[in-house]
Image (cartoon, rainbow, N blue to C red):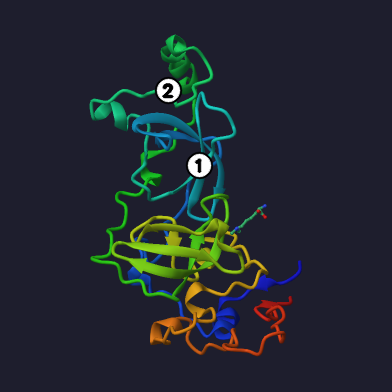
Amino acid sequence: YPGHFSWEKYLKECGASAAPAHCFRQCFTPPANEFKAGMKLEAQDPRNTTSTCIATVVGLTGARLRLRLDGSDNKNDFWRLVDSSEIQPIGNCEKNGGMLQPPLGFRLNASSWPMFLLKTLNGAEMAPVRIFHKQEPPAPAQNYFKIGMKLEAVDRKNPHFICPATIGEVRGVEVLVTFDGWRGAFDYYCRYDSRDIFPVGWCALTGDNLQPPGTKVVLPKSLSIPAEGVTESPSMHPIGKGTAVQRGRKPGRRRGRQPMNWLHKG
Ligand code: MLY
């Protein structure tokens, strides 16, 4: 066990601060996860969001469920928070006058769907209504994020990972989520009220496994050496103290890797 990631040390080292909890569309206390592997429920098909399908819980991590649509393959699993409005107890769709649909990429002939549905529900362990959360938390009134704030975010390319991240840009109702220690490949824009972003300390509360930051030294665009004639503005120092990056250093004297003191041994 090489050591675990400490937000406290890391924030100090970066001279950064955590985005306050009121920025997020998340409960202040993470919702309890009473689901069990094998339970079935109704879920919106992420690839065809107008259809409601049967899903099986194939894994649990913190306040999230790893779901697989019945009749689909094992290559299209997706993750949902237990308080997501996109999951419902079995019976909810019909109660609202809807019809359960086969998932996109149903592995059998479409004509065999009714029989498949009967068989998959026969003797199934249905997630009990009481373990669902009544409502999704409300969205904050507006986008309160500021550039440089730290958070925990789902890596959408590897959605089982939640990782330390930084707000790289704020654009109207959207924010740029940048992953600490990784070059831009995993970054994404999302709405400020996305359910994929969490306050610092979320994983520690849910028992989810927070990935440590990557090891690539990244110079945020706003901290890189300004182009000739560009005047510095305060927004060019979003991280605070500015100790992590030496500005205007002599050519040839390159800064080495960041010491990773935020990994405390134990
Ligand atoms: N095997 C992948 C994992 C990358 C995960 C990046 N996240 C944590 C931001 C890779 O190295 O590309």
- Vertical relation: 179 (above or below) 130: below
Say whether marks 2 and 1 touch (CB < 8 Å). no
> Which element carries disc 1, helix, strand or loop?
strand
Considering the image in quadrants, where does the C terminus appear? bottom right
Quadrant hosting residue 89: top left
Percent coordinates x, y for residue 36 in the rendering:
53, 42
Amino acid type shown at disc 2 = Pro
For the view shown, which residue lies furthest in the top direction?
Answer: 111
Can you give x and y, in whole percent of width and height, for residue 229 in the image? 44, 85
Residue behind mark 1: 78
- Identify the mark at residue 102; answer none if there is no mark: 2
Q: In the figure, is residue 39 to the left or right of 213?
A: left
Q: Where's the N terminus, which quadrant?
A: bottom right
Establish if 47 lies above or below 264: above
Ligand 1's image quarter is: bottom right
Between 34 and 179, the residue placed more toward the observer is 179
